[in-house]
Image: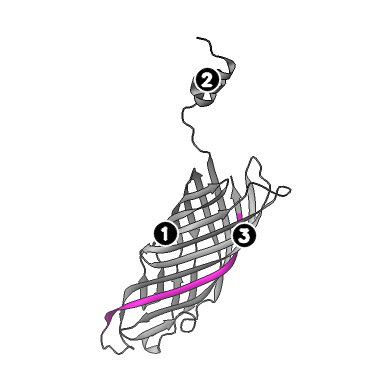
Amino acid sequence: MVFSSGASLCVAQDFPGLANPFSPIFSFPPLQAEARGTLIWMNLLKGSESAPSVPATFDFKKFWGMDQGAAFLDAMVRLQVGPFSARLHSNMRYFKGTDSFPASLAGVGVAAFDYTGLRIGGDFDVLRWGRSRVGIDMDYDLYHPVVTATGISELTGPSAMTLGFHAVYNPSYNFYGFSAVGEGRARWSIVGSQISDWEISAGLKGPETVLGSVAIMTGYRRTNVAFSDWVTVGPPWPQQTAVPVRANIDVSMGGWFGQLAYYY
């Protein structure tokens, strides 16, 4: 049987393995990677510890004199295959003040709010074109929010698992090699401490090379943290002996950041 050149072309298009027995039957999407370094000035917008059954309320800034704001360095790396991504974040949030409890408690110590550690996450892109994508994501904090007052109390919230979404604009077209980029992310707790966290950013990406491309971005981030824990209280509160009470923590932080992103 003799095939014409046209028939041979059709066979090669529909069944490439027949025309080229060394071609793979299955092909995998290319691996993409991303790394970011972020310098953020985070303001402590509000913070309080309250124990309704006592009752007693301590304002982080008014009562403990915690920092109004501080600079922190965050980092993130991401690997992507097809519509699936895996992320690793490093975040630091630490605000410190001086406890000012009555003299009957003796001594002056440190009061602090600490929300620092690693976070893992995964993305699934529902829509994707080039490097632009829209989808859902899930994250898990490998750390806990902690409020401490030296010699008085330490309250710890459970690690949070969150569900959220992302929208990334990273076009393939450019103007003299440069293009605008933008991104928005938000997440909310489904398990653990009550976390709501969102950010939005935009910037300029440089030319694509065989080694990847670099973008400079700026944006704003807002984080709210709330949890409850048991704390033991005694004098100078009305109780004659120390008793455990349920205390509530409510913290809000927000600030502007500059970011350097690398895409491969």
The Cα atoms of the two marked residues, 3 and 2, are separated by 47 Å
Helix, strand or loop status at disc 2: helix
Amino acid at the residue labelled 3: Ala
Is 228 or 118 nearer to us in this picture? 228
Q: Quadrant of residue 53?
A: bottom left
Amino acid at the residue labelled 2: Ala
Q: What predominant SS class does the magenta segment belong to?
A: strand
| Label number found at residue 38 | none
* Crowding at mark 1 (Cα within 10 Å: few <14, some 14-19, many 20+): some
One can see residue 107 in this view: no
Q: Is residue 262 one of those drawn in magenta?
A: no
Q: Is residue 230 above or below residue 240?
A: above
The Cα atoms of the two marked residues, 1 and 3, are separated by 23 Å
Which residue, given by chain and number where applicable, does mark 1 sit on? 163
Q: Residue at x 52, y 54 (%)?
A: 76
Which residue, given by chain and number where applicable, does mark 3 sit on? 202
Q: In the rendering, at what x and y percent does residue 79 appear? A: 50, 46
Q: Quadrant of residue 3?
A: top right
* Foreground label between 2 and 1: 2
Whether residue 18 sits left or right of residue 175 in the image: it is: left
Q: Tell me which numbered mark, 3 or 2, is placed earlier along the sequence.
A: 2
What is the magenta range?
A: 241-260
Rendered-image quadrant of the C terminus: top right
Q: Residue at x 48, y 62 (%)?
A: 186
Whether residue 202 sits left or right of residue 79 in the image: it is: right
Q: Tell me which numbered mark, 2 or 1, is placed earlier along the sequence.
A: 2
Q: In the rendering, at what x and y percent does residue 65 appear? A: 50, 81
| Label number found at residue 19 | 2
Q: Is residue 27 above or below residue 111?
A: above
